[in-house]
Amino acid sequence: MIDNHIILLSLRCVLTSPAAVTVIGSPLDVADLRVMGAEVTDVLDLDMFNIAHIMGNHFNAGKWPKRRCGSVITCVIECRSLYARVERFLKIHGHATPGYASVIWFGYPEYPFDAPVIVKVSEEQPRDLVDRIGNVIRITQIDPSQVMVERDPDCEGVCWMMRDSGFDTVPRS
């Protein structure tokens, strides 16, 4: 039985603007895709894209660290919101899936104002997160909300995030 929710998301999550310059994915992308169950042999099976449209919102790959660059995404994984910067969007030749995003994770979100609207994150990628879920996600996992970013002028490697819409999913304590 096909889940109608997945079909709807697939129709509203689209990769556009193939990379103008020949860009080859990473062998780590291939490994993460294999762990996810995708049938991929090597990096030559992948097409690279610069842009994803997620439920009407436009995201750009590889634009970090601009303030409102469109490369910063949020998604809910393991019952909590996580933030990442997209390095590249990927699609496997001949596969019907809408595509994937190769990301670098920010640190686990902190909510210093007791509200899931303004979020503090470290630029350092948590090793345990990468070990558990890797650096590739389905584009259907991306929340359709733009994220504004402000680097902390007083603390190197720390960023403040604020979503244009919605709220973070905060783990229960």
Image: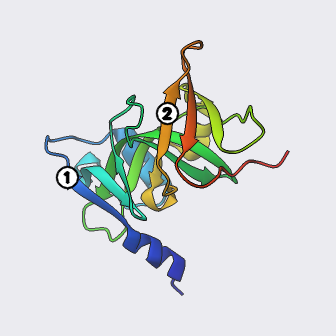
Q: Is residue 139 left or right of residue 50?
A: right
Q: Of 121 and 127, which appears nearest the observer?
A: 121
Q: Of 144 and 36, which appears nearest the observer?
A: 144
Q: Which color scheme did the rendering employ for the protein?
A: rainbow
Q: Earlier in the sequence, mark 1 or mark 2?
A: 1
Q: Is residue 95 left or right of residue 35?
A: left
Number of numbered callouts drawn: 2
Residue 99 in which image quadrant: bottom left
Tags 1 and 2 touching, CB below 8 Å: no
Examine the rendered structure and indicate whether residue 35 appears above or below residue 93: above
Q: Report, in whole angstroms, how far the alpha carbon at label 1 lies from the one at label 2.
A: 26 Å
Q: Is residue 91 left or right of residue 167?
A: left
- The three-letter code of the residue at mark 1 reads Pro
Residue 154 in view (yes/no): yes
Picture coordinates of residue 106, whole percent (x, y): 55, 33
Q: Residue at x 37, y 61 (%)?
A: 39
- Extreme residue toward the left, this view: 21
Q: Of 116 and 101, which appears nearest the observer?
A: 116
Residue 82 in which image quadrant: top right
Q: Of 147 and 31, which appears nearest the observer?
A: 147
Q: Find numbered disc 1 in the image and state the secondary structure of the residue it sits on.
A: strand
Q: Residue at x 32, y 37 (%)?
A: 62
Q: Residues within 10 Å of mark 2 (few under 14, many from 20)?
A: many
Picture coordinates of residue 35, whole percent (x, y): 49, 53
- Extreme residue toward the bottom, this view: 1
Q: Which mark is residue 149?
A: 2
- The three-letter code of the residue at mark 2 reads Val
Q: Residue at x 29, y 51 (%)?
A: 51
For disc 1, the marked residue is: 18
